[in-house]
Image (cartoon, grey):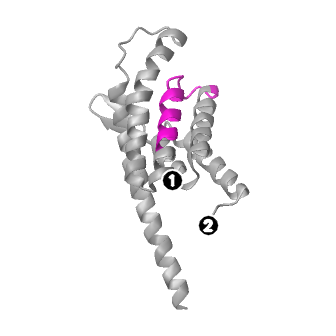
Amino acid sequence: MEMKKTKKLTMAAMFVAIGVVLGNIIYIPVGVSKCFPIQHAINVLAATILGPAYSVMIAFSISLLRNILGTGSLLAFPGSMIGALLAGMVYKYTKNIYKASIGEVFGTGVIGGMMAFPVAKYFMGKEVATFFFVYPFILSSVGGSIIAVLLIKVLDKYINTQISTNEEK
């Protein structure tokens, strides 16, 4: 069953609000670095619920708003948008949340991590190695992807339980 456009826009706005508010609040300390998984969880959730176009627009909106508010960096754009696109495309063609999560990790971690290099060098004036951002981007996207898969599994189980309970009445 296709979701109506108003519902999709409402859900997209909710994802953007959650991403902007929780983007810097929730993090997981990993050694000397911090993993900020919310953007990546939203990428996978949006990709599986709304599709690739919405997931990319949501990632862009969150990155833009966080930059305007001074809580994000320009590096959020390549990582989040490429991860959202890959997660959405993989889910669109496979209907598999695990593969969508792998698409998020590869898109954000590997491709987005390498695309962050020219952003850092030419727009931010930072001299870093080409693969400098790959490890932290992979780390963060793995954490977010795991959270998204767990949320989807719990919600799916809850919804199916509710449907079967309503059918018994």
Residue shown at 42% from the left, 54% from the top:
97
| Residue lying furthest right | 6
Left or right of 111 in this view: 18:
right
User: In what element is the residue under mark 2?
Assistant: loop
The spot of residue 24 in percent (x, y) is 49, 36
Measure the C-alpha gap from mark 2 to mark 1: 14 Å
Can residue 53 be seen at all in this image of the molecule?
Answer: yes
Residue shown at 52% from the left, 79% from the top:
163
Q: Is residue 123 above or below residue 156?
A: above
Q: Is residue 8 above or below residue 111?
A: below
The answer to if 83 sits in the magenta stretch is yes
Closer to the observer: label 2 or label 1?
A: 2
The spot of residue 13 in percent (x, y) is 66, 47
What residue sits right under mark 1 in the picture? 48
Viewer-nearest residue: 2 or 26? 2
Q: Is residue 111 above or below residue 46?
A: above
Q: Quadrant of residue 65?
A: top right
Viewer-nearest residue: 89 or 161? 89
The answer to if 127 sits in the magenta stretch is no
Q: Which mark is residue 111?
A: none
Left or right of 73 in this view: 153:
left
User: In what element is the residue under mark 1?
Assistant: helix
The spot of residue 2 in percent (x, y) is 64, 62
Number of other residues with Cα within 10 Å of mark 1, as a class: few under 14, some 14 to 19, many 20 or more: many
What residue sits right under mark 2 in the picture? 1
Type of the residue with mark 2: Met
Can residue 27 be seen at all in this image of the molecule?
Answer: no
Overall secondary structure of the magenta section: helix
Residue shown at 73% from the left, 56% from the top:
6
Type of the residue with mark 1: Thr
Q: Magenta stretch: give its range.
A: 68-87
